[in-house]
């Protein structure tokens, strides 16, 4: 059993202590810098001075106080390895749930056995709700594919966000987290739902509550649950969660060579990993045109309109720089997000209404036509997994001008079928757009090469065969 100390005997420490106690376990003690607390008990747990960590063996120390950054530095200065320090809400939950699970499953303290259905079901993890996003779009399209193959399924979603998209390929099971009293209640909701759908394969898209519940369900019903974890993003949370819980994961699908290399370096079993690519509409013969000299360049963006990750705020900065460079252009923005209203306001403020058009949400069936009307696909993202928008744009002949994030160089050969620049380098993004504006023949040539790149890759990519084989493999059929 792990030995864990909590650094911070205050309100946060009390919260995390109660979280662990819900699962019947507790830390071996609190650590605190307040000398008045040393030798006392807080919530019936002993409180020690920081020096305790120098003389006692332990597995982890969790930072459970408001002054987290300073405590983190203090622990490093004490010589404690970074891997032993649990700092941040997601990392705390990830490790504490894992810690609790080892005790929790041994005691079989959660719930009665599940009921077994006649047919295997596919359960889709839509932790962030039925919203507009690449992960969700991929899940909906996969659901259509699997239903066509005869599989029953259920969407697992939550009340954390309001549904933006209504997809009825499979029924939705909504977890009412807002009614839960604690962390254990949230976990139990997921485990109970899985137990009611045995035997099942759960496609986990996010390293959050549904994933954690699924791993616990797998520990309880190892013969009736299979986990296919998909790493959609180059986010640290994925690496930590999937790495820690990998004993329960049957297959880990990764969407870029960058992610595959990084997971391997961090210790993920290579036999569990499969690199996948996006399957998007791509006709063998590309029928479209590109803008000619003296006509405005059509620049497209499709995705969530957010500052976090997508950096949609930089679209305006790029537009202003293009205008200063005397470039005629129209930036067409397809998508919605929490930055949409601000972007619309700033467009008016800068007098760019004639240059930037907000198209809003576009149906999946219309996205190919959207890209065929664009000369360039632009992305300012700070991180990605492997942008499906990038693949869709290239399949339609739009030249990608993008930042160097995970998945970018799996599709784009810089200077051949698009351009890749450093993250945050808007000057280089503008420079590449100006080059294509001034060289329309090269624009068309690169657009055709972009299309050919995706088309050739997809020729032998039969999704039905892949998923049939994958499901047979994880169930050893």
Image (cartoon, rainbow, N blue to C red):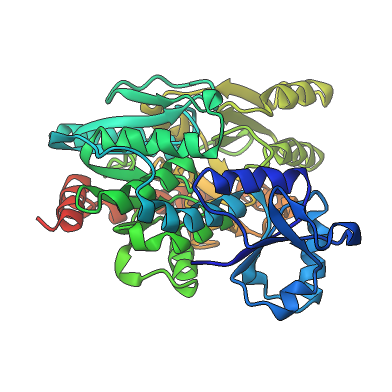
Q: Residue at x 26, y 50 (%)?
A: 226
Give the percent coordinates (x, y) of residue 260: 43, 65
Q: Residue at x 21, y 39 (%)?
A: 198
Please state if 214 lies on the left or on the right of 51 as rendered: left
Residue nearest the viewer, comparing 37 with 288: 37
> Count the marks: how many?
0
Residue nearest the viewer, comparing 223 with 349: 223
Query: Residue 111 sits in which quadrant?
Result: top left
Q: Is residue 473 at all visible to an observer of this figure? A: yes
Give the percent coordinates (x, y) of residue 302: 53, 34
User: Is residue 154 shown above or below 214?
Assistant: above
Q: Is residue 309 at all visible to an observer of this figure? A: no
Query: Residue 116 sits in which quadrant?
Result: top left
User: Is residue 212 shown above or below 106?
Assistant: above
Please state if 464 lies on the left or on the right of 437 as rendered: left
Residue nearest the viewer, comparing 379 with 325: 379
Give the percent coordinates (x, y) of residue 10: 78, 47
Q: Residue at x 81, y 23 (%)?
A: 351
Q: Residue at x 42, y 23 (%)?
A: 363
Please state if 134 lies on the left or on the right of 111 as rendered: right
Residue nearest the viewer, comparing 292 with 127: 127
User: Is residue 420 shown above or below 346?
Assistant: below
Give the percent coordinates (x, y) of residue 44: 69, 51
Quadrant in which the C terminus appears: bottom left
């Amino acid at each position: 059993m792990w030995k864990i100390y909590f650094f911070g005997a205050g309100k946060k420490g009390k919260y995390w202590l109660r979280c662990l106690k819900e699962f019947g376990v507790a830390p071996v003690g609190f650590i605190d810098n307040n000398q008045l607390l040393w030798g006392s008990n807080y919530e019936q747990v002993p409180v020690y001075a920081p020096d305790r960590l120098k003389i006692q063996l332990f597995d982890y120390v969790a930072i459970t106080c408001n002054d987290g950054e300073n405590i983190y530095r203090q622990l490093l200065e004490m010589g404690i390895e970074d891997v032993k320090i649990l700092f941040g809400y997601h990392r705390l939950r990830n490790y504490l749930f894992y810690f609790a699970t080892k005790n929790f499953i041994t005691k079989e303290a959660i719930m009665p056995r599940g009921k077994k259905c006649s047919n295997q079901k596919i359960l889709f993890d839509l932790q962030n709700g039925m919203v507009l996003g690449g992960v969700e779009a991929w899940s909906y399209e996969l659901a259509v594919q699997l239903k066509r193959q005869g599989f029953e399924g259920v969407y697992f979603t939550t009340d954390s966000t309001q549904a933006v998209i209504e997809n009825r390929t499979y029924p939705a099971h909504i977890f009412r987290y807002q009614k839960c009293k604690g962390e254990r209640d949230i976990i139990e909701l997921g485990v109970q739902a899985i137990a009611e759908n045995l035997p099942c394969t759960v496609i986990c898209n996010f390293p959050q509550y549904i994933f954690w519940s699924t791993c616990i369900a797998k520990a309880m019903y190892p013969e009736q649950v299979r986990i296919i974890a998909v790493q959609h993003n180059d986010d640290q949370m994925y690496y930590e969660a999937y790495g820690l819980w990998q004993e329960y994961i049957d297959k880990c699908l990764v969407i870029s060579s960058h992610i595959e290399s990084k997971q391997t370096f961090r210790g993920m079993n290579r036999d569990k990993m499969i690199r996948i690519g996006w399957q998007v509409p791509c006709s063998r013969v590309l029928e479209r045109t590109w803008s000619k000299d003296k006509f405005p360049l059509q620049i497209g963006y499709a995705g969530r309109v957010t500052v976090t990750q997508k950096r949609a705020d930089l679209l305006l900065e790029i537009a202003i720089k293009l205008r200063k460079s005397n470039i005629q252009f129209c930036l067409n923005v397809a998508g919605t997000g929490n930055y949409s209203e601000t972007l619309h306001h700033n467009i008016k403020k800068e007098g760019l209404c004639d240059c930037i058009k907000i198209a809003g949400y576009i149906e999946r069936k219309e996205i190919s036509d959207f890209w065929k009307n664009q000369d360039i696909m632009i992305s300012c993202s700070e991180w990605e997994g492997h942008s499906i928008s990038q693949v869709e744009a290239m399949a339609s002949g739009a030249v990608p001008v993008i930042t160097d994030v995970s998945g970018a160089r799996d599709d784009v050969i810089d200077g051949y079928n698009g351009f890749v620049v450093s993250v945050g380098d808007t000057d280089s993004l503008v420079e590449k757009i100006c080059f294509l504006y001034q060289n329309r023949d090269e624009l068309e040539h690169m657009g055709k090469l972009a299309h050919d790149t995706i088309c050739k890759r997809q020729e032998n990519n039969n999704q039905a065969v892949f998923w049939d084989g994958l499901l047979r493999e994880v169930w050893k059929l």
